[in-house]
Image (spheres, grey):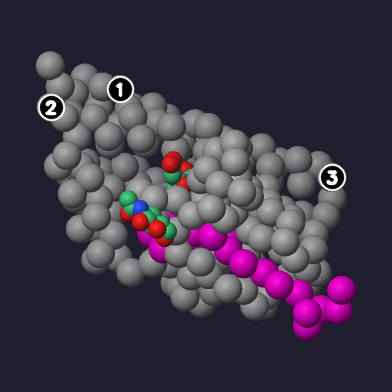
Amino acid sequence: MARNQEEVKLLGVRGSPFVCRVIIALKLKGVEYEFIEENLGNKSDLLIKYNPIYKKVPVLVHNEKGVSESLVIVEYIDETWKGNPILPIEPYHKALARFWTKFIDDKIFAAIRKALFTKDEKEREEGIEESLEALQFLENELKDKFFGGDEINFVDIAAAIIAFWVPIFEEVVGIELVTSVKFPKLYNWSQELINHPIVKESLPSRDPLLAYFKGLFANIPASK
Ligand SMILES: N[C@@H](CCC(=O)N[C@@H](CS)C(=O)NCC(=O)O)C(=O)O
Ligand SMILES: *[C@@H]1O[C@H](CO)[C@@H](O)[C@H](O)[C@H]1NC(C)=O
Ligand SMILES: *[C@@H]1O[C@H](CO)[C@@H](O)[C@H](O)[C@H]1NC(C)=O
């Protein structure tokens, strides 16, 4: 199929850090796409059809082929549209980039969730401790302006959640995680990332998101 006949659709919601990864990747590659806003309270037939297992966004539909899971989608985009590479080419560096993205989802995101989405103080303290421990590994890994060096790469895209969403969570819950004192490199990186032109135009608006998470947090049942 000729390039100009390509049909690219993204099923998503605006505020999702996982959907945002895919938006950043598509914009970096200069791929035109149609954004289809999902209502997660009443999922579309399209979402159920293309992601019957998890029924989650993002889903990329490229010429009627569906791809799910944000990190898998970003790799697919990188391999399908050349130019502005997202993953390293060299196998060892590629393996390391995949390792860190998995670490972000399995360790950092899990610990941060634990710290946030609870009203149990003991659970929160444990979550904060686990978050700080995990973030320290990422701080030690950061050697340049971005994880990708001068340009953003797979790890920067995966970690956008730390740069943009985590400060919102901190504000909602009233805790501190990524401060310039605790994590000077990560803090600077987060400022660079959210001001990177492609990332900046891919991020959702902060205020509605803050209001949304405030509501979500207020509705967490009190612990026994
Ligand atoms: N591991 C998934 C996570 C995606 C995810 O959690 N999506 C949320 C929105 S932020 C969702 O679709 N939730 C709907 C549901 O769980 O029913 C990814 O990386 O794509
Ligand atoms: C869910 O969405 C479908 C399709 O847009 C609509 O027909 C239906 O009324 C919606 N259901 C609810 C409970 O809002
Ligand atoms: C962070 O940025 C500030 C201001 O640009 C700079 O003074 C500081 O040295 C940077 N810190 C690190 C750890 O890069």
* Residue 3 within the magenta-colored segment of the rendering: yes
Residue highlighted by disc 1: 126
**Type of amino acid under label 1:** Glu
User: Residue 8: where, in percent of width, then height?
Assistant: 67, 69
**Type of amino acid under label 3:** Pro
What span is colored magenta in the figure? 1-22
Q: Secondary structure at mark 1?
A: helix
Q: Is residue 17 above or below residue 198?
A: above
Q: Residue at x 54, y 74 (%)?
A: 198
Would you say 9 lies left or right of 64 here? left
User: Residue 100: where, in percent of width, then height?
Assistant: 61, 40
Residue highlighted by disc 3: 91
First in sequence: mark 1 vs mark 2: 1
Which one is in front, 212 or 85?
212
Q: Residues within 10 Å of mark 3 (few under 14, many from 20)?
A: few
Q: Is residue 173 above or below residue 30?
A: above
First in sequence: mark 3 vs mark 1: 3
Q: Residue at x 52, y 43 (%)?
A: 55
Q: Is residue 152 visible?
A: no
The answer to whether the residues at label 1 and label 2 have Cβ atoms under 8 Å apart is no
Q: How far apart are the alpha carbons under marks 2 and 3?
A: 48 Å
Q: How far apart are the alpha carbons under marks 1 and 2?
A: 17 Å
Q: Residues within 10 Å of mark 1 (few under 14, many from 20)?
A: few
**Type of amino acid under label 2:** Ala
The quarter of the image that holds ligand 2 is: bottom left
Q: Secondary structure at mark 2?
A: loop
Residue highlighted by disc 2: 222
Q: Residue at x 37, y 36 (%)?
A: 112
**Number of numbered tags placed on the structure image:** 3
**Which numbered disc, 2 or 3, marks the residue closer to the eye?**
2
User: Residue 101: where, in percent of width, then height?
Assistant: 60, 43
Q: Residue at x 12, y 16 (%)?
A: 224
